[in-house]
């Protein structure tokens, strides 16, 4: 499996915590001395720099990590992403569209306008803009192009729940976009992949409750959530299959959840 990652470049959005951060670590552990490059992006640059230092230490410099500050909800920053990369980092092979968030728990009529906007701008428009920025790199390769686009959706996109209508709608949009893109690219070697987690303990619930950790902790009472590593392992497994194998669509949830 690790052979496919030889000299490859991976770009992860939302790599400053949770699933994105674990995915960077998991890629590094899978190919510790293989010339792998990982571009880790998010808004919190300091966390990315810490992650880069951790990976450097763990792999004794075998995996190169480039921290890049990127707010996916800012179209101008997304447009500047590829032009701003050093030349040797531009040949991206794997894109993990993971940045995303939920804000608030409220019935549809009460959801704050600002929360609706930030969820759509990040989870949907941000993911689409990043995909459009990276696709030309994939398309330049022979046979219609090559590369992996791995989109992190959610169980919420398949099974919407009361109090989460906007978040669920954003993840349903991710799912539709992913499916349509896969069909558009079917004659290429570009794999378009959806990974839908169920409940995972990360900073996700803290963000949902606007930083209230006590409220966030309550979410996990009475059940054991997944860890971000559980999802990272599946993402890296999916990305390290041989080119002809497309694990297109995966739903992963803790035993207690459904
Ligand atoms: P975390 O809150 O731990 O991580 C979210 C990441 O997204 C952070 O690195 C954050 O970085 C980044 N992010 C948020 N907004 C932006 C933005 N505008 N631009 C760039 N990066 C951004 O949560 P998770 O790891 O759980 O979430 C990762 C993905 O998994 C999300 O798409 C989420 O919807 C999905 N998911 C999570 C589930 C769960 O139960 N945890 C279940 C199903 C899906 P920063 O703040 O530094 O920008």
Image: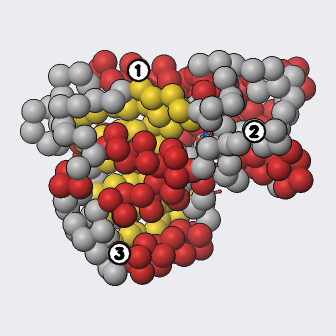
- Distance from Cα at disc 2 to Cα at disc 1: 32 Å
Q: Quadrant of the C terminus?
A: top right
| Residue assigned mark 1 | 179
Q: Position of residue 256 (x, y in %)?
A: 69, 31
Image height of 116 relative to 79, above or below: above
Q: Residue at x 34, y 81 (%)?
A: 60
| Residue assigned mark 3 | 59
Image height of 212 relative to 119, above or below: below
Q: Nearer the viewer, residue 254 or 15?
A: 254
Q: Nearer the viewer, residue 226 or 134?
A: 226
Q: Residue at x 87, y 29 (%)?
A: 106
Report helix, strand or loop for mark 2. loop
Report helix, strand or loop for mark 3. loop
| Residue assigned mark 2 | 223
Q: Position of residue 105 (x, y in %)?
A: 84, 33
Classify 10 Å Cα crowding around label 2: few (below 14), some (14-19), many (20 and above).
few
Whether residue 164 can be seen here: yes
Image height of 33 relative to 253, above or below: below
Mark 3 or 2: the one toward you: 2
Whether residue 128 can be seen here: no
């Amino acid at each position: 499996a690790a052979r496919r990652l030889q000299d490859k470049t991976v770009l992860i959005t939302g790599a400053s915590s949770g699933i994105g951060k674990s995915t960077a670590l998991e890629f590094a552990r899978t190919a510790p001395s293989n010339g792998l490059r990982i571009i880790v992006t998010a808004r919190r640059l300091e966390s990315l720099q810490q992650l880069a230092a951790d990976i450097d230490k763990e792999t004794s410099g075998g995996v190169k990590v480039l921290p890049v500050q990127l707010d996916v909800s800012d179209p101008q920053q997304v447009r500047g992403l590829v032009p701003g990369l050093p030349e040797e980092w531009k040949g991206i092979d794997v894109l993990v569209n993971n940045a995303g968030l939920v804000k608030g728990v409220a019935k549809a009529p009460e959801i704050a306008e600002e929360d609706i906007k930030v969820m759509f701008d990040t989870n949907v428009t941000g993911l689409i803009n990043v995909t459009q920025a990276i696709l030309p790199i994939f398309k330049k390769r022979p046979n219609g192009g090559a590369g992996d686009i791995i989109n992190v959706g959610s169980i919420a996109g398949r099974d919407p729940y009361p109090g989460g209508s906007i978040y669920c709608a954003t993840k349903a949009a991710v799912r539709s976009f992913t499916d349509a893109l896969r069909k558009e690219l079917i004659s290429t070697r570009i794999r378009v992949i959806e990974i839908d987690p169920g409940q995972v303990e990360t900073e996700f619930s803290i963000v949902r409750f606007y930083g209230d950790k006590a409220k966030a902790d309550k979410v996990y009472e009475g059940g054991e959530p997944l860890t971000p590593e559980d999802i990272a392992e599946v993402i890296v497994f999916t990305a390290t299959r041989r080119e002809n194998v497309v694990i297109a669509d995966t739903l992963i949830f803790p035993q207690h959840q459904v």
